[in-house]
Image (cartoon, helix red, strand yellow):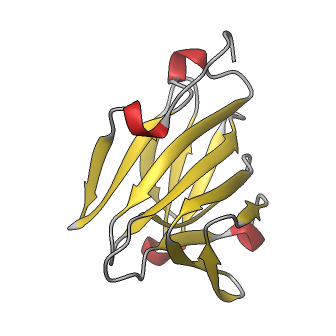
Amino acid sequence: MKNLLVKNLNSLEGQLIDRDGNQFTVKTIIPDEETGKCRANFVEVEPGNYAYGYHYHEANEEVFYIVSGTGVVRTLDGELPVKAGDVIGFPTGEKGAHVIKNESENEKLVYIDFGTTVLPEVVHLPDFNKIMVISEEVNGIYDK
């Protein structure tokens, strides 16, 4: 980060992301222009929805801290139940594949998504047999 940041979940404006009828909200903690070696966002997932889709990273690690609610994280080894206070670390490579879903019927799942910002990055999307390439000059999704 380039400057000291203090953010409050309740005062941040969120960006609603809608992918094929699945919705979640991202509230940026560290904006792109402040990103140095890490990034962080609050993510809010309404009941019955998931965030981002099943994926894994070649270059960047991620850590989720569950602020409130409950959910299920799909991994290469199966599903893991998570609840407020849990921390989940995702390594690079296929062993770090994940997606988090809110299986509650009435409670929002809120978590902080921390991650490194190494470029170039290749994100694998196994359910779609595609990859996402992110670099200083390229940002796109391609067939694997």
Q: Residue at x 76, y 73 (%)?
A: 95
Q: Residue furthest top?
A: 3
Q: Is residue 126 visible?
A: yes
Q: Quadrant of residue 52?
A: bottom left
Q: Is residue 57 visible?
A: no
Q: Residue furthest left?
A: 21
The N terminus, quarter of image: top right
16 to 125, vertically: above or below: above
Q: Residue at x 42, y 51 (%)?
A: 141
Q: Nearer the viewer, residue 26 or 90?
A: 26
* Left or right: 57 in relation to 138: right
Q: Nearer the viewer, residue 59 or 9?
A: 9
Q: Residue at x 66, y 10 (%)?
A: 3
6 to 57, vertically: above or below: above
Q: Residue at x 66, y 36 (%)?
A: 120
x, y percentage for residue 58? 72, 53
x, y percentage for residue 119? 68, 33
Count of marks, rendered view:
0
* Left or right: 60 in relation to 49: right
Q: Nearer the viewer, residue 104 or 133?
A: 104
Q: Quadrant of residue 50?
A: bottom left
